């Protein structure tokens, strides 16, 4: 068994043990018939998540220097601004198409399943506070946020889209320097390999992070939440599976039978994203596995960072699914024109959000207010958002992997 397979096995074992431990702890966390939490056990559950918090911090520590170094080298190796524009155009064409398919699929499924009308949940007051800030909905706010006022601040806060913009400028400028730029390219290429080496070290802690994450969420939520929201969760995951099938069919047309090799390669980052509910946590490993699959470094380092800002397919589906679910729960009928307008709004406002937990809720909050849907409906989802985030984070990894393979194939850079 290879080292990669061993790690995947340990992550899966940690996932199962976390669920079992969480169920056992939940019996003590909610001991009474009135589901009153045991105050003595609450600090224990908080401490359990230390492993997950530390692991995610270590991953975030790697993201900024890894994105910057690999993207600059990738752009510089493309040779000129024409190549950057050509590959960038193909990349954005795929992203826009995949995003629209994800949004449309979510819209169709929520209209077919009608989860909001089936569940008949008691709704909170319309003026209830959600604790989630709205996303900026203005065109000016979206455009100005893309461009960093300080690259140091962008790296400190892991604003991937801003880092990408600076890296594109830096890479093009470096390529135009000729021999003088070679020194910088070699240095940053070495930095990128060092960061991937660090990733290998950090990944050894992944099973502990997965175990603590699953233990905490199952212990706190228990089986009751799964039963209460079972219809919504089941239908959403059915939608994600359908989206996976669509993405894999697209990948099959590109690489034929090598699709099975691709699935094998991304299974580890996929499981990691699912367990930690963060597609960002799987970024370094996804990059490494795509290069092993045969995608050239210059393509991977260009497409993948952009994908984490523009191609979050799982999050896209969730936004339409959740927004229309809340509208159905309140008995608010939305016409076809209104639903189409919502898709277009989500297409714009979702760009640039980080692949981290609860980022989608921020965009949904802004979208609900734009269509006069009570924002308090978000309270219906907060209890199970982590469980939903696990699925959409894993889907984001699949979507970005397929996108990278697609652009590599179009550029004839797939070994």
Image: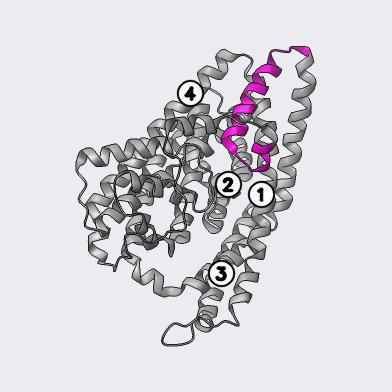
**Residue stretch in magenta:** 153-179
Q: Position of residue 216 (x, y in %)?
A: 56, 69
Q: List the residue tagged with mark 4.
A: 410
Label located before the other in sequence (1 or 4): 1
Instruction: Locate residue 344, reporting x and y percent.
Output: 33, 35
Residue, disc 3: 216
Q: Is residue 344 left or right of residue 414?
A: left
Upstream in sequence: badge 3 or badge 2: 3
Up-down: is 176 above or below 93?
above
Marks 4 and 3 sit apart, C-alpha to C-alpha, by 44 Å
| Image quadrant in which the C terminus is located | top right
Residues at marks 2 and 1 touching, judged by CB atoms closer than 8 Å: yes
Q: Residue 176 colored magenta?
A: yes
SS for tag 4?
Answer: helix
Q: Which quadrant would residue 173 be assigned to in this image? A: top right
- In the image, residue 239 sits, relative to residue 122, either above or below, namely above
Is residue 49 visible in this depiction of the protein? Answer: yes
Instruction: Return the residue found at the far front.
Output: 127
- Is tag 1's residue or tag 3's residue first in the polypeptide sequence? 1
Could you say where residue 156 lies in the image, as x and y percent from the top left? Answer: 68, 42
């Amino acid at each position: 068994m290879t080292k990669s397979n061993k790690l995947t096995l340990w992550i899966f074992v940690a996932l199962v043990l976390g669920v079992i431990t969480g169920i056992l702890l939940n019996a003590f966390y909610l001991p009474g018939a009135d589901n009153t939490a045991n105050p003595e056990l609450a600090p224990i559950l908080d401490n359990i998540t230390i492993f997950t918090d530390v692991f995610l911090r270590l991953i975030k520590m790697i993201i900024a220097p890894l994105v910057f170094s690999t993207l600059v080298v990738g752009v510089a190796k493309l040779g000129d601004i024409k190549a950057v524009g050509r590959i960038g155009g193909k990349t954005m064409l795929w992203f826009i198409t995949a995003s629209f398919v994800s949004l449309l699929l979510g819209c169709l499924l929520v209209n077919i399943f009608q989860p909001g009308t089936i569940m008949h949940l008691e709704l909170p007051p319309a003026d209830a506070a959600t604790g989630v800030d709205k996303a900026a909905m203005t065109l000016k706010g979206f455009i100005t946020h893309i461009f960093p006022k300080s690259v140091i601040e962008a790296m400190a806060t892991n604003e991937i889209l801003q880092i990408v913009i600076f890296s594109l400028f830096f890479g093009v400028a470096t390529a135009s320097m000729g021999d003088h730029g070679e020194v910088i390219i070699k240095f940053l290429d070495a930095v990128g390999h060092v960061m991937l080496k660090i990733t290998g070290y950090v990944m050894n802690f992944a099973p502990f992070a997965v175990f603590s994450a699953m233990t905490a969420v199952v212990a706190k939520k228990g089986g009751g939440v799964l039963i209460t929201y079972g219809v919504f969760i089941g239908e959403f995951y059915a939608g994600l599976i359908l989206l996976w099938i669509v993405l894999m069919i697209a990948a099959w047309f590109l690489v034929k039978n090598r699709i099975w090799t691709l699935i094998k390669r991304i299974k580890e980052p996929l499981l990691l994203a699912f367990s930690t509910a963060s597609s960002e946590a799987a970024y370094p490993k996804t990059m490494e596995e795509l290069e092993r699959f045969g995608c050239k470094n210059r393509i991977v380092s260009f497409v993948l960072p952009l994908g984490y800002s523009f191609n979050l397919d799982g999050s896209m589906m969730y936004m339409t699914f959740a927004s229309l679910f809340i509208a159905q729960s309140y008995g608010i009928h939305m016409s076809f024109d209104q639903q189409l307008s919502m898709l277009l709004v989500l297409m714009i406002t979702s760009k640039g959000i980080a692949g981290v937990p609860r980022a989608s809720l921020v965009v949904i909050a802004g979208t609900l207010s734009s269509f006069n849907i009570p924002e308090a409906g978000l309270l219906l989802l907060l209890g199970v958002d982590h469980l939903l985030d696990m699925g959409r984070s894993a889907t984001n990894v699949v979507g970005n992997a397929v996108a990278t393979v697609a652009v590599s194939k179009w550029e004839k850079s797939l070994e």
